[in-house]
Image (tube, rainbow, N blue to C red):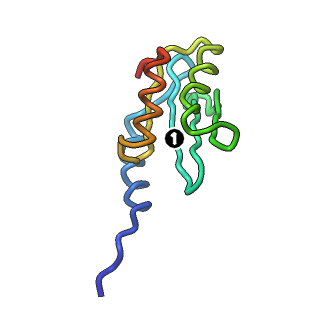
Amino acid sequence: MIKPINKNKLRVKRHKRNRKNILGTSTVPRLYIFKSLKNFYVNLVDDKTGNTLISVSTLKTSSADIGDEVAKKAESLGIKKLVFDKSGYKFHGRIKAIADELRSKGLNF
């Protein structure tokens, strides 16, 4: 019998492999994305202290506005540069749309 492929296990494996090389600081925080079946969660994290600087989800905003909301909150904290952590997801679709929205609002990564 052939075992079915567990795509989430493969995603977590990619995430752990990439996470070894990604580190966020207070001046250049790490932006990571988590997708559930219904919602998106985007957080800006300072890995040196372990603090979450910004947290935005589609529970309160639509998925089209999530990049705009993160950009506004980052600007209020004086953040212009960040490290993008796509958490093992492929860079297309809504992940790419969020990244393009953040770039258009002036954030560099």
Q: Three-letter amino acid code at disc 1? A: Ile
- The answer to whether 42 is drawn above or below residue 16 in the figure is above
21 or 8, which is in the foreground?
A: 8
For the point 30% across and 88% down, the residue is 1
Q: Secondary structure at mark 1?
A: strand
Quadrant of the image for the C terminus?
top left
Q: Nearer the viewer, residue 14 or 80?
A: 80
Residue for point 47% across, 26% down? 101
- Left or right of 86 in this view: 56: right
Query: Which image quadrant is residue 50 in?
Result: top right
**Residue visible at 64% across and 29% down?**
54
Question: With 3 as the anchor, is 27 left or right in this view?
Answer: right
Q: Position of residue 12 (x, y in %)?
A: 43, 54
| Residue, disc 1 | 33
Q: Position of residue 17 (x, y in %)?
A: 36, 47
Residue 56 picture location, percent across and down: 64, 35
